[in-house]
Amino acid sequence: MRHVIKEILVLVPGSIAAGWFVGTVQHYVAFAALGGGFAVASLELAFFEGGIVGGAAGIPTGLVTYYLALGRRVTPMRVAAVVIGSLLLGCSVTLVGLRMMGDGFVPISVVTTPALTVAVATIVNRLRPA
């Protein structure tokens, strides 16, 4: 039981940080694609608006990714691959969604990015056994 508590005490803050990072970058890129530009004010908005949502979504995503997709077998390389894959796929899908649906896609990205993260983790688990 202590082992699980230690895992969660590391996993939750790490998941919040990763989600915050992905959410901030994804919001910044999406905002620029909608015409907001890459200004410092846009980054500040992305940090709070996208970061908070990303951090909140990061908790359940991190738990599912760690326990189910990666089977509790993580290395720094696997974590980096999942975060970078999530970031690249999340931004790509959001940009395509924005192109197709306009800003109506933004709330949908709150669901697609975590789903893509779990998919990336599953692929990483199969391609890079720990």
Image (cartoon, helix red, strand yellow):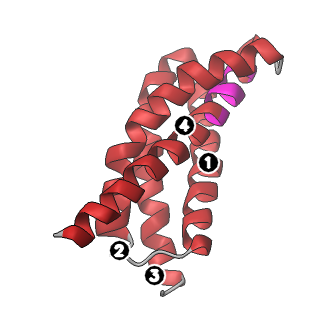
Q: Is residue 102 above or below residue 78?
A: above
Q: Tell me the quadrant of the picture where the N terminus can be found.
A: bottom left
Q: Nearer the viewer, residue 115 or 12?
A: 12
Q: Nearer the viewer, residue 27 or 48?
A: 48
Sequence order check: which comes first, mark 4 or mark 2?
4
Going by the numbered disc 4, the residue's amino acid type is Trp
Q: Main secondary structure of the magenta part?
A: helix
**Separation of marks 3 and 2 at Cα, in angstroms:** 13 Å
Residue highlighted by disc 4: 20
- Does dot 3 land on a helix, a strand or a loop? helix
**Separation of marks 4 and 2 at Cα, in angstroms:** 22 Å
Going by the numbered disc 3, the residue's amino acid type is Arg
Q: Is residue 77 above or below residue 115?
A: below
Q: Residue 87 — which label?
A: 1
From the top left corner, tell me how far across and down residue 109 is, in percent. Answer: 47, 33
Residue at left offset 70%, top offset 18%: 44
Residue highlighted by disc 3: 126
Q: Nearer the viewer, mark 4 or mark 3?
A: 4
Label 1: how many Cα within 10 Å (few below 14, some 14–19, many 20+): many
* Quadrant in the picture for residue 68: bottom left
**Separation of marks 4 and 1 at Cα, in angstroms:** 11 Å
- Does dot 2 land on a helix, a strand or a loop? loop
Magenta span of residues: 25-32
Label 4: how many Cα within 10 Å (few below 14, some 14–19, many 20+): many
Sequence order check: which comes first, mark 3 or mark 1?
1
Residue highlighted by disc 2: 72
Q: Say whether residue 40 is magenta.
A: no
* Quadrant in the picture for residue 35: top right
From the top left corner, tell me how far across and down residue 119 is, in percent. Answer: 43, 61
Q: Do labels 4 and 3 touch, CB within 8 Å?
A: no
- Does dot 1 land on a helix, a strand or a loop? helix
